[in-house]
Every structure is written in C-alpha cells, then in structure tokens.
Image (cartoon, rainbow, N blue to C red):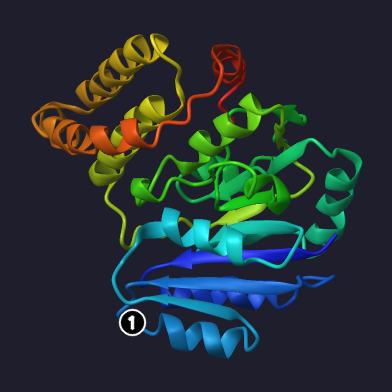
Amino acid sequence: MTVSVMIATRNRAEELRKTCRVLGQLNPPPLEVLVTADSCTDKTVKVAMCEVPGARLFINEVGKGSVASRDRMMREARGDLVLALDDDSYPEHLDCIARFVPIFQQHPQLAVLHFPQRTDEYPETLTQPNFGLEHLARSFANSGAVLRRSTYVQLPGFESRFFHMYEEPDYALQCVAAGYEVLFSPIVTIRHHYSRQVRSELRNHHRHARNELWSTLLRCPFPFAIGMAGWRVFSQFRYAARRGWSWIIREPVWWWQALAGIPYCLGKRRPVSWAGYKRWLRLPETR
C-alpha cells in the first residue's frame, strides 16, 4: 500500500520547515507530500518548495480554511493511505510507515488510524511513558492520523463549510455509521509542538461549537436531531460558563453564525441511521 502525506498550513513557515525535515528522514519514504498554503503571506511557499522539492503544492490565494484544504488533498492524493499532519506535528518514529501499513492490510474495514500525541498543549504528555491500549474511538486529530483514501471518497468526507475545527468527529461519525472503524493505536507517537501562532482559543471554541451543531443537522436523523441540537447548544454554553463571564457574553457570536448556516445544512443533509449514530456516540472520545 502506498502512502501520501498531507499538510494544511497558514503562516507558520518555520514550523513547516521543521516538519518537512523530519518527513525527509522517514524510512521508507512516502509516495508524495501534499502541502496546501492557505492564504499565506510569509515564506511558507518558499519553505515547502525548498524543503520538499517534489512536493505537490496547492496555493489558496483567498483563505478556504484547513477543512476544505484537507478535503481537496484527500481527493487529489495518489496514495492508498494518507498520513494527515499539521504544519507543527510529525511522527516520532521514522519507520512509522512500516508500522502502520500492515494494520490497514490486516483490517479492511479500518478507515482511520490515529496516534497519541506528545504536545506542548498538554505538557504532561511530553514525558508520558504509556498511552494505553488500542481501542476504537469516535474522533481523531488530523495532526496525527492515517486515512484510507478509498473509504474517504465513498463518503461525504470533510465538510468544507466548517472552515476549521470539528471535521474529524464528523467524518468519524460517517465512518462508524457506514460500518467502518476508527482506531486509536500507540504503535506510533506524534510530536505536536502546537504553535500558538494563528490560534485563538475563544475563536476555536466558537468554530467547534458551531460546526458541532451543523454536523448534528447534517447527520443526525429526525426527530432525534432536535433533541441533539438542543443538547449541543446547552453543553457548549456550560463549557463557556466554566471559562468565565468574558466567554459567556461572547457565546451568542457562534449562535448567529450557526443560524446563518442552517439552510445550507438542511439542503445538504445526509442523515445516517439512528442505530449508527448511537453506535458512534457510545465510543470513547480519544483524540
């Protein structure tokens, strides 16, 4: 099985440089590296061309977001499998391809394989000796996951309207409801430097909450979608309340964004079965 690598990036040239240098050391090497520079105004394009001379480079002059960028690369990739990374994440095992390819060969229903991350976002993981056993999950992180491309093109895939955030649990739901598996495995670990550049915690919360609600409207069958949508709004408000008044007073920002997208979601609805939706909900939320 052949392996492509995809990276979506925006104005993190130095982080991308470090990741590309690690990719150049992988043994065996990937079939190809795809990089999308999304509305970049720094040296990102130059870095990608210099560090990975054969990279397939996609340039979005106007920002389309990480979700649409990844969707395009998944559809353009030539490999049977696609290793998804962030511009600031890379495998700690240089033989990672030799480690994960056999798992896909042995499990034809496996759609996504994802790995534990040593990340600066959670400093305790940097020295964590054990990440547990393999188990099925209902989400994953595109900063360290392998996707089977043939499965991806059969399903709706990443919803480009999301722009950024929540494409992973939404796609995992599609996979699980269709009878495929999303598996967490510590066979490989990912070093995620988690750059704070071009990141806003509050903005990411708003995007995550909005997209979670949109995913409910897109995938959850009626009449269950009504109750699930209400629960989503309540649980996100409860999270904001724990962060303090500065978050509470800004919570309506994503409500209005979500309302504006409801006609789009209803027009594009592809609900899964309620049995499939429940099966996904029961899985652990390992990320």
CA neighbours of label 1 inside 10 A, class few (<14), some (14 to 19), many (20+): few
Residue plotted at (43% across, 57% down):
68
Image position of 171 with respect to 79: above or below: above
Question: At x 29% / y 71%, what residue is drawn?
Answer: 62
- Residue 17 lies, in percent from the top left, at 53, 78
Q: Quadrant of the C terminus?
A: top right
Q: Amino acid at mark 1?
A: Asp
**53 vs 172, nearest the viewer:** 172
Element type at marker 1?
Answer: loop
In this orientation, which residue lies closer to the viewer: 5 or 80? 80
What residue appears at the point 53 percent right and 49 percent down from the top-left corner? Answer: 119
**Image location (x, y in percent) of residue 14:** 45, 77
Q: From the image, which quarter does the N terminus lie in?
A: bottom right
- Asked whether residue 36 is in view, the answer is yes
Query: Residue at coordinates 84% horizontally, 70% vertically from top-left?
Result: 28
In the picture provided, is 185 more to the left or to the right than 210? right
